[in-house]
Amino acid sequence: MTLPRLSLTSSFSTLRGRFMLVLLLVLAGLLMVYAVIAYKVTERAMLSWVDDRLATVAEDAVNMARELEAQRHQKGVSTDEPIELDVPGGFQVQIWYMAPDMYRLVARSSGAPTAALDPQARARPTNKPQTRTLRWQGRWWRVRTETRPWNQGRRWWIVQVAVDITPWRDRAPWIGWVLVASGIVLFGLFAIVLERLTRLLIWPMEQAGQLAQDIIHTKDLSRRLPADNMPVPEIRYWAEAFNTALDRLEQLFQQQRRFLADVSHELRTPLTIIRGQAQLMRRTGEYDPEAVADIEKEAERLARLVEDLLFLARAEAGALPLRQEAVDLDTVLLDVLRQTQMLAEAKQQRLELEHLEPLPVRGDPDRLTQAILNLVSNAIQYTPPGGTIHVGARREEQWAVVWVRDTGPGIPPEDLPHVFERFYRAARSRTRRGGGGAGLGLSIVWWIVDAHGGHITVQSKEGEGSTFTIYLPLDPDRVWEDDWDDEEDNGAENNHGPADST
């Protein structure tokens, strides 16, 4: 798959550019926040470790000072010289006596200054240790100052422990630079990955837009997106759905072209007959009953064609509302048989009712009558004289089933999938006796049945006839009532039986 290249310096006016800009800005902000937090956490962890060491050294120094002072008292040595404390390298310790009127240095580590590193902390002794970072004599020190009671609270020891943290402070900026460098590397890697991903994700949309523009200009609906080359499954499914939509659109355009061609063909024949008969009477100057009859016949044919076309157009546009009311489909079937009985007799055909059951459904009674009437009329039209048309109705689980079977010439197998399409007529059906329909009746039947939540099937064998079967959902409320009434009737008969026999 060949994808268009996109550099990070490209314009951000496109969807892909804006998408990358937003994500990169968000990433930059997150990396900055991460760097600050990481630096602060590292600094806090280091100082926490140093503070723990200061507390340990302070505790050891206090215990050592007490022991050495006790040894002095036991030996009777009295001196103002501070006690020398042995503490780990790098640490400085100072311990003072604090009386109401004086401070006196009583212990210190070797090399420690005689002045307090943190005079402010010494000047305000509290029970809670104070830890600060100070700069003294060009070095950075971490200083811990705490106050401890001595001699039953009449005097206090002030303990101050310090450690030189200059080496760590000097290296601290390097931590920041490492975080900045790693952030830049991550930012660059993310930008590269993002550029690749945006091309994979947005490229199909750009291709779809370009394809749509090309179709508009070239009017070539056969072009498709290369769905097989899409590496991401979700995008491949989207491309396949887009191609499916184009397939459907191309099919609709082809149907429209065929529809216009069929309409023009269907209109041309009756119009030609009407015009020819009218011209014939004009030339002869005489009234011709046969010509007038032909004109009336073709005019009626045109009226039916226009009416059927308007019906399908309104139905597909959603402008044909259907009533939803209780309908007895068996009653509708009987009405259709009464209406078509004389038509069948006129063609020397037999119209037989094979089976009939109560079929309560919900729908539009006029449209349901139209659907069944179209099927029966179609059977009468294509059944030769002497043939028989069988009609019946029964229940099958939750379906109301109505079938119409004729003894006509049948439909070729290759034509069966297309019999419900507009203007479609099998090649052999054009030669059937009584032909001449526009090919819209079965399309109307299919739409009516589908609009009522049902479906229609057709079975046919050449030379043996065809069977059209309508399936409509039964009305569950009325079916339950009918079944309940039947149970009550059976129960009543059973109850009265013994009494009558008695």
Image (cartoon, rainbow, N blue to C red):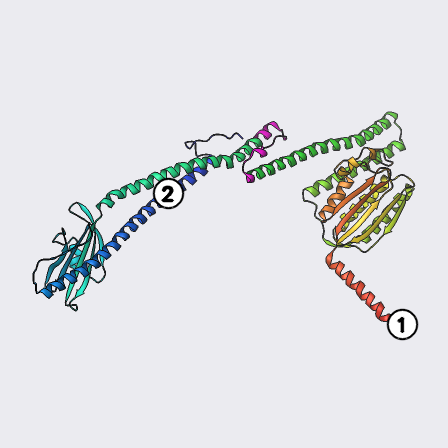
Residue at mark 1 to residue at mark 2: CA–CA distance:
98 Å
**Does residue 422 appear left or right of residue 178 in this picture?**
right
**SS class, disc 1:** helix
> Going by the image, does 338 lie left or right of 233?
right
Q: What amino acid is found at the position of numbered circle 1 in the picture?
A: Asp
Residue 136 location (% of width, % of height): 16, 48
**Residue 431 in sight here:** yes
Q: Which mark is residue 500?
A: 1
Quadrant showing the N terminus: top right
Name which quarter of the figure residue 189 lies in: top left
Q: Which mark is residue 316?
A: none
**Magenta highlight range:** 213-234
Residues at discs 1 and 2 in contact (Cβ within 8 Å): no
Please provide percent x and percent y for residue 277: 85, 29
In the figure, is residue 421 to the left or right of 385?
left
Question: Residue pushed farthest bottom?
Answer: 502
Q: Quadrant of residue 175?
A: top left
The local crowd at label 1, few if under 14, some if 14 to 19, many if 20 or more residues have their Cα within 10 Å, is few
Could you classify mark 2 by the number of other residues whose Cα lies within 10 Å: few (under 14), some (14-19), or many (20 or more)? Answer: some
* Residue pictured at 70% horizontal, 43% vertical: 315
- Identify the residue under disc 2: 31
